[in-house]
Structure formats: C-alpha cells, structure tokens
Image (cartoon, rainbow, N blue to C red):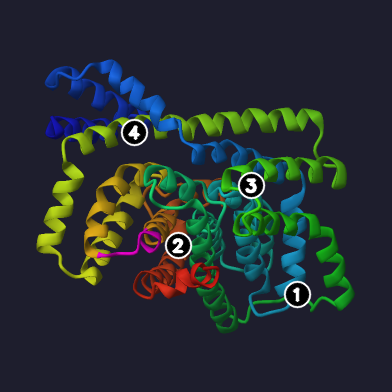
Amino acid sequence: MINLLLTLIIILLFISTPIFVSLGLASFVSVVLLSETEPMILVQRMFAGLDQFALMALPFFILAANIMEGGGLSDRLLRWARALVGHLAGGVAMTTQVSSMFFGALSGSSPATVIAIGKIMYPELVRRKYDPAFAAGLLASAGSVSLIIPPSITLIVLASVITTVSVGELFTAGIGAGLIFGIAAVVYIYWYSKKHDMPRDKKASAQELLDATLKAFWALLIPVIILGGIYAGVFTPTEAAGISAVYALVVSAFIYREMSWKKFYQVCVDSAITSAQVLVLVASAQILGWLLTRSGVPQQIAGYVTEHVGSIVLFLLLINVALLIMGMFMEGVAAIIIVAPLIFPAAMNLGVDPIHLGIVMISNLAIGMYTPPFGINIFVTQTISKLNMLEMMPGLKRFLIVQFIALLIITYIPESALFLLHFFE
C-alpha cells in the first residue's frame, strides 16, 4: 500500500495538484484499494489532527500579522531601523535586513514580510544605486528569516506534528538561529557596500533616533510582550497569539489610528483564508502521517539510519541536503508535516537534540523559501521588482551562499542556536 501511496503523491504533485489534495486523495485511494481500513477512519484522523491546542495559535498569529501590516506598524519599524543603522556602510540595505527581522518577529510569515518591507524598501534601494538583482536577492533572503524567528507559523506546526517538542523551547532556539542568519547577512551587506562604495544616510541625531524610537515604540513592544510573557510563564504560546492579535488591533485602531472598520473586515477575511489554507494542509497531512506510522515506515527508516549512519555529523549533513532539495519545490509547512515524523525517530536513536534538529530543519526550509525554481519568496519579490528569475539570480546566489554558511554554523555548532535556551534553564 505504501508504494502505491507514495507513487500517487508523486504523480499528483508532478501534475501540479494542490498539496493538500495530493496527500488526502492519494491516502484515500490507497486505503480504498489496498486496505481493509474503513475510509471514515481517515476522516476522523483529519479532524483529530486539527484537535491540538498548539494549532489554535495559528489563526491568531496570522490575524495579528495582517493587522500589523495594515495598521502602520511596518512603516514605523522601517523608519526606526533606518535611523538606527542608515548611516553605516550599506545602511539602506541593512535597514531592509533589520526591519525584515523585526517584522518577521511580529508577523511570523515570510511572504508577508517580503511584501510589507519590499514595497517600501526596493524602490529606495534602487534609487540609492544598489544593483536591482542585489536588492531583489536581499528582499527574498531577509523575508525568509521569518520562518525561524518566533512567532513562526512553521515552528508551531512542527510542535504540533512532533508533540514531544515544546513550542516555547523552539521559539527560544529560533531567536538564536534567526540572529545567526541576520548577522551573516549584515556582515555581507557591509562588505558589499564598502567594496562598491554605496551611499549612506546622514547619521541620525540623538533626537531623531529618539523620535523614531518613540513612534515605533508600540510596534517594538509586541515581540517583548509575546516572547517575554511566554518565557516568564505568564501565558502559553497559544494565549500569546490571542493577546498579540488584540494588542495589534488596539495599537492600529486607537494609537496609530490607521485601522478602519472596512480595513479590519478585509483583514479578517484575508486571515480566515490564510488560516484555512494552512489548516487544511495540516489535516490532509495527518492522514499520510497516520498511514506511514501504521505501516512502520518511520521505524524502518530509524532502524536503517541507526545501522548504516552511525555519525551524527553525517546524519545532519544528509538531512541538510534532503531538506534543501525539498525546499526548492515545497513550502515549509508542507515539508515539515511530511518529513518530520520520518526524521525524528532516527534522530532520537542517534542522540540528536530534538530542539536542535527542529531548528536545523526550519533553517533549511527558510533557505528553500528563496531557492530556485519554486521558492515562494522569489515570486513575491518578482511582483515588487518586476525582474524575472534569470535577472534575479546573481543576487539570489550571493545571499544563498551567505545563508549556507549560517546554516552550517547552526548545524554543527548547536550552542549558536541553543544558547538562549540554556540561559533560561
């Protein structure tokens, strides 16, 4: 049955069938044709897969992200970041990187970060004589860090698939990994800008920096409230999601006064659609995971890896290669749902730290967000830059190399990502 199941999934994906249809339809057909299992059980498994407390955070974080984007928070973050680093070599590009990291910490969505930051910063980068390919590569790369920096939707899904992994611990480790990615990009931007003598802003005065900070204060406070509350034990990640949505609405509507009732209605509609898209994928993937587990596939893979791959170094290398390839063709949430149940048993047998493994997996898929041919950030960036993929490739290639180095650091120096986790122990 497993052979038929996997064959059907590959065929359906190859003919561009939506991923949730491919997983669900292949599972139902395989069970009906080659199993005595009642098809109704698969329906029950779909709903059981959604009946998880951690998944309740998804729609709230998605709603919060959309409110932030429409409520003026991204503009204020950009002005603050520019006042902070705009005077440095590559200051405008650094502003793009830094503000993307902050907005990613607010939204948890990679494409949303590219759109919110890119539509403002791409024209400015080009006006400042940055190569359009460099600017496009920067946008696609900077937005991908949203998969790693909490509150990441992908981290929440991973915790829902592998229930032995804590959302809070993944969030803590995600900060460390996100900083590694961000610092690597900033170092490269500085070197590139010095080499090409790129223009920079006049250094902001203390008063200008203070004004920009005060205007962005309520936006900057969001990650402090979310992450601080989680780590202090005041509320769970799921409760934090609800609080972030309410807080973002209050700030957008009553402090910044940029959220009208009409705009809020559209935000709710967009959030409901996005939430449904993610959750229907989770539901259909639960069937696949259940069938694979019932057939003993994860256990077989774990046994094979334990017998033939005795080195953690080699195992992590194989995981990186496999996920980088998968990330070229598949969105992060879908890849996590399919691969995580297969990888984790083998990793546990080898003694790999589950939090470290989760962060390594997410880091690979973050790079996949802007890896040709199907990285979604590439297509989002194209709508902003109007460049085709061939024109974007020089810029994408530069940032891919930089982030590959960051990935190797995270993979083989676990403390680089886990230091905050150990600090809070």
Image quarter for residue 192? bottom right
Q: Secondary structure at mark 1?
A: loop
Whichever of labels 2 and 1 marks the residue nearer the N terminus, that label is 1
Residue 110 seen in render: yes
The answer to whether mark 2 and mark 4 are in CB contact below 8 A is no
Q: Amino acid at mark 2?
A: Leu
Q: Which residue is mark 3?
A: 240
Q: Secondary structure at mark 2?
A: helix
Residue 294 belongs to the span the image colors magenta: no
Q: Amino acid at mark 3?
A: Ala
Which percent across, then down, holds residue 378? 47, 51
Please tell me which residue lies in front, 3 or 370.
3
Q: Which residues are magenta?
A: 351-357
Q: Secondary structure at mark 3?
A: helix
Instruction: Note whether 204 is above or below 111 in the view shown.
Output: below
Q: Which residue is mark 1?
A: 201
Q: Amino acid at mark 1?
A: Asp
The answer to whether mark 2 and mark 3 are in CB contact below 8 A is no
Mark 2, Cα crowd under 10 Å, few <14 / some 14-19 / many 20+, is many
Mark 4, Cα crowd under 10 Å, few <14 / some 14-19 / many 20+, is many
What is the distance, in whole Å, between disc 1 and disc 4 at their CAs? 51 Å
Q: Which residue is mark 2?
A: 396
Looking at the image, is mark 3 or mark 1 nearer the viewer?
3
Residue 129 seen in render: no
Q: Which residue is mark 4?
A: 286
What is the distance, in whole Å, between disc 2 and disc 3 at their CAs? 35 Å
Whichever of labels 3 and 4 marks the residue nearer the N terminus, that label is 3
